[in-house]
């Protein structure tokens, strides 16, 4: 399943479902910026389900949609694409771009955790 094959609207819908954990068509509609019609949202949900991105369960008359893949796994795939497309595969370049941006706010606690993660990575080789 390739996340990058999703249209902009499909990615927006997946973002809503991931952020809520599960969602009805009405909930998706409520959380979309410049939402399409209700029937369009239902069509997108059906398409995403047919492609294996979502599954649904029935609750009364409503369908509740949930992602088929863990958000973390999809996030890793998306991060790898960003690294490859915008930073020539360089994690260092991406992290530098983010941390050196004056608009970026990173707490001392987060920097300490990042430092510990880098230390673990160094030990692995």
Image: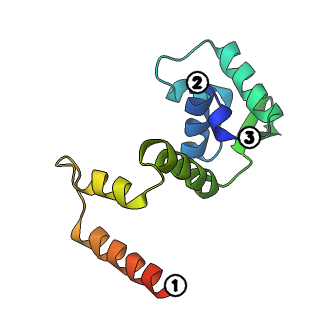
Q: Earlier along the polypeptide chain: callout 2 or callout 3? A: 2
Residue 7 versus residue 89: which sits nearer the camera?
89
Q: Is residue 27 visible?
A: no
Location of mark 3 (residue): 53
Q: Tell me which residue sits at (43%, 42%) in the image.
A: 86
Mark 1: secondary structure = helix
Q: Earlier along the polypeptide chain: callout 1 or callout 2? A: 2
User: Please, is residue 32 above or below residue 38 in the view?
Assistant: below
User: Please, is residue 57 above or below residue 116 in the view?
Assistant: above
Location of mark 2 (residue): 9
Residue 70 versus residue 8: which sits nearer the camera?
8
Q: CA distance from mark 1 to mark 2?
A: 40 Å
Q: Left of 39 or right of it: where is 59?
A: right
Contact check, label 1 and label 2, Cβ < 8 Å: no
User: Please, is residue 32 above or below residue 37 in the view?
Assistant: below
Location of mark 1 (residue): 124
Contact check, label 2 and label 3, Cβ < 8 Å: no
Of badges 1 and 2, the one in the foreground is 1
Q: Tell me which residue sits at (55%, 46%) in the image.
A: 81
Q: Left of 93 or right of it: where is 64?
A: right
Q: Position of residue 10 (x, y in %)?
A: 63, 28
Residue 56 versus residue 91: which sits nearer the camera?
91
Q: Quadrant of residue 39?
A: top right
Mark 2: secondary structure = helix
**Badge 2 density bin: few <14, some 14–19, many ≥20, Cα 10 Å:** some
**Badge 1 density bin: few <14, some 14–19, many ≥20, Cα 10 Å:** few
Q: Earlier along the polypeptide chain: callout 3 or callout 1? A: 3
Q: Quadrant where the N terminus lies?
A: top right
Q: Left of 24 or right of it: where is 96?
A: left
Q: Quadrant of residue 99?
A: bottom left
């Amino acid at each position: 399943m390739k996340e990058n094959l999703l249209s902009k609207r499909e990615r927006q819908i997946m973002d809503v479902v991931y952020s809520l954990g599960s969602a009805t068509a009405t909930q998706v509609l409520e959380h979309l910026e410049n939402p399409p019609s209700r029937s369009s949202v239902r069509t997108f949900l059906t398409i995403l389900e047919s492609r294996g991105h979502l599954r649904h369960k029935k609750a009364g008359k409503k369908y509740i949609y949930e992602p088929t893949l863990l958000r973390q796994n999809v996030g890793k795939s998306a991060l790898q694409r960003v690294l490859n497309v915008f930073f020539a595969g360089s994690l260092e370049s991406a992290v530098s771009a983010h941390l050196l941006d004056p608009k970026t706010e990173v707490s001392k606690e987060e920097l300490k955790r990042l430092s510990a993660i880098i230390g673990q990575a160094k030990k692995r080789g």
